[in-house]
Image (tube, rainbow, N blue to C red):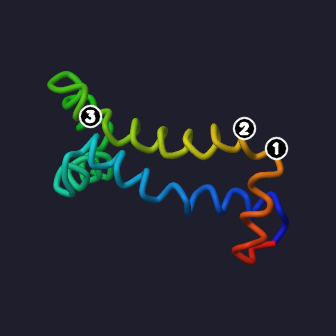
């Protein structure tokens, strides 16, 4: 595994507790997450989203906000710390390099 992929893998693994905390903050519990997932994976999802968007905008946009934040966190961490020599020794300690 090359050093760049090891850094990304390390960032994603270290952030798992952050993702779980963020999910609890946005969805409150697993039922809220499963409801948002059901809404977005519906067979007629565009009509359902359009109808739901008029009724409750926050409930409709919870899943995309969660996914975007889960992607943005490692990207921002990589931009802040990925170019320094801090992440490389950590990846070497874990045996990823």
- Residue drawn at x 80%, y 57% as measured from the top left: 4
- Decide: is 40 above or below 95: above
Mark 3 vs mark 2: which is more N-terminal?
Answer: 3
Q: Residues within 10 Å of mark 2 (few under 14, many from 20)?
A: few
- Residue drawn at x 70%, y 44% as measured from the top left: 78
- Decide: is 88 above or below 18: below
Which mark is drawn over residue 79?
Answer: 2
Secondary-structure class at tag 1:
loop
Mark 3 vs mark 1: which is more N-terminal?
Answer: 3
Secondary-structure class at tag 2:
helix
Where is residue 13? Give x, y as percent. Answer: 56, 63
Cβ atoms under marks 1 and 2 closer than 8 Å: yes
In the image, 36 versus 46, the foreground residue is: 36
Q: CA distance from mark 1 to mark 2?
A: 7 Å
- Residue drawn at x 51%, y 55% as measured from the top left: 15
Which mark is drawn over residue 60?
Answer: 3
Horizontal side of residue 32 vs 96, given as left or right: left
In the image, 90 versus 13, the foreground residue is: 90
Q: CA distance from mark 3 to mark 2?
A: 30 Å
Q: Which residue is mark 1?
A: 83
Q: CA distance from mark 3 to mark 1?
A: 37 Å
Q: Residues within 10 Å of mark 1 (few under 14, many from 20)?
A: few
Q: Count numbered badges in the picture.
A: 3
Please, which residue is most extreme toward the bottom here?
95
Cβ atoms under marks 3 and 1 closer than 8 Å: no
- Residue drawn at x 25%, y 28% as measured from the top left: 58
Mark in front: 3 vs 2? 2
């Amino acid at each position: 595994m090359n050093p760049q992929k090891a850094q990304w893998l390390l960032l994603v693994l270290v952030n798992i507790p952050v993702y779980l905390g963020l999910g609890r903050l946005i969805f409150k519990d697993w039922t809220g997450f499963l409801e948002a997932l059901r809404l977005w994976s519906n067979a007629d999802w565009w009509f359902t989203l359009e109808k739901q968007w008029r009724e409750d905008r926050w409930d409709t946009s919870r899943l995309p906000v969660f996914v975007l934040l889960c992607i943005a966190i490692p990207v921002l961490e990589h931009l802040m710390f990925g170019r320094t020599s801090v992440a490389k020794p950590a990846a070497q300690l874990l045996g990823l390099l």
